[in-house]
Image (spheres, rainbow, N blue to C red):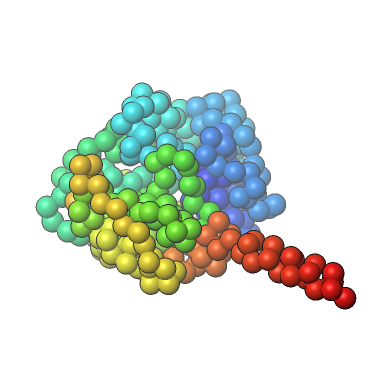
Amino acid sequence: MIVLITGGAGFIGSALANQLAAEGHEVRVLDDLSSGERDNLDSGVHFTRGEVSNIPKLWSLLQGVDCVYHLAARVSVAESILYPREYNEVNVGGTVSLMEAIRDAGVRRVVLGSSGAVYGQQGTQPVHESALLSPDSPYAVSKLSAEQYVHTIGSLWGIETVALRMFNVYGPGQNLPVSHAPVVPRFLRNVVTGGSVVIFGGGLQLRDFVYVSDVVDALVRSATAADISRQVINIGSGVGTTIRGLVDTIEQVTEKQANRLYNQEKSGGIQQLTADLTRAKALLGYEPKVMLADGLKRILVEDARFRPAPMKVKAKKMGFLQSAVHGLM
């Protein structure tokens, strides 16, 4: 199988690209490197730098492609509130440009990386795909718009389309920008380094944290699963964890106590959001395998950014003692 992954040098995209390449598929990646890294990709992946709105470049990359994974997007809820126009241009405009190129290139299937954020606040948990949508940020609106464009253009031109609504994805290699960093790596880094963990609201907000390898498994299955065209499918762990519970689990796996600071003046966002996985299990045979504590342990082992720094002070003291000993000899 030949696949193209837009945003394929990013956190989720690179994990998918490397997995597909390891399975023997021809993998092409298009990424503008605004948040991704070329070094994330294994040598067997064919990388092209460029924007998803560059239709001539897309035409050349789409030749012979069986499936397109569209993961290129701006992904910060908080940032989208500040820059809604940019989120519309990239997440919506980029999707429309890609679908035009896919239509003209004759690609058979498109898998869109969507988000659980499209649900907004829901009274019933876990959230099923049939729930009435209530997006409450420009990011969420842009992802819902992308879903609609992908399915509508796909229906008009006979392209198989599926949208995976991913919940809070985490794992090794996840970006840690200076501002608006994702909650799992931000909290984990702060606990490991002895910094403070700032919890907005009361910390009782419920979230569904899903490990990146489980998401990759769902994405891989979506390329070949039968009878899934025009579907939207939740991809999560199916387990709700409060923000306080996340900090508790980080303390357990790191064996460090977190310095918790509560900011009651700032909202912690949606109060509850946990994925109903009934449809994912039925259509994809999807079963999440990595629970939160195990996922955090894997990050500590695999991601060097979360390993304790060497004790330089002790090393200096040892060097001084050695020099003193030599001086006495």
The quadrant the C terminus occupies is bottom right
Q: Tell me, yes or no, if residue 281 can be seen here.
A: no
Count the labels in the image.
0
Relative to 241, 314 lies left or right: right
Q: Residue at x 63, y 62 (%)?
A: 313
Q: Residue at x 64, y 66 (%)?
A: 314
The one of 230 and 97 positioned closer to us in this rendering: 97
Instruction: Give the x, y percent position of residue 321.
Output: 74, 70
Q: Residue furthest left?
A: 123
Q: Residue furthest right?
A: 329
Q: Residue at x 29, y 38 (%)?
A: 140
Q: Tell me, yes or no, if residue 125 can be seen here.
A: yes
Residue 250, by quadrant, is bottom left
Relative to 280, 221 lies left or right: right
Residue 9, by quadrant, is top right
Relative to 167, 6 lies left or right: right
Instruction: Give the x, y percent position of residue 12.
Output: 48, 51
Instruction: Give the x, y percent position of residue 70.
Output: 46, 42
Q: Residue at x 47, y 61 (%)?
A: 192
The one of 195 and 60 positioned closer to us in this rendering: 195
Instruction: Give the x, y percent position of residue 328.
Output: 84, 73
Relative to 93, 53 lies left or right: right
Q: Residue furthest front?
A: 328
Residue 256, by quadrant, is bottom left
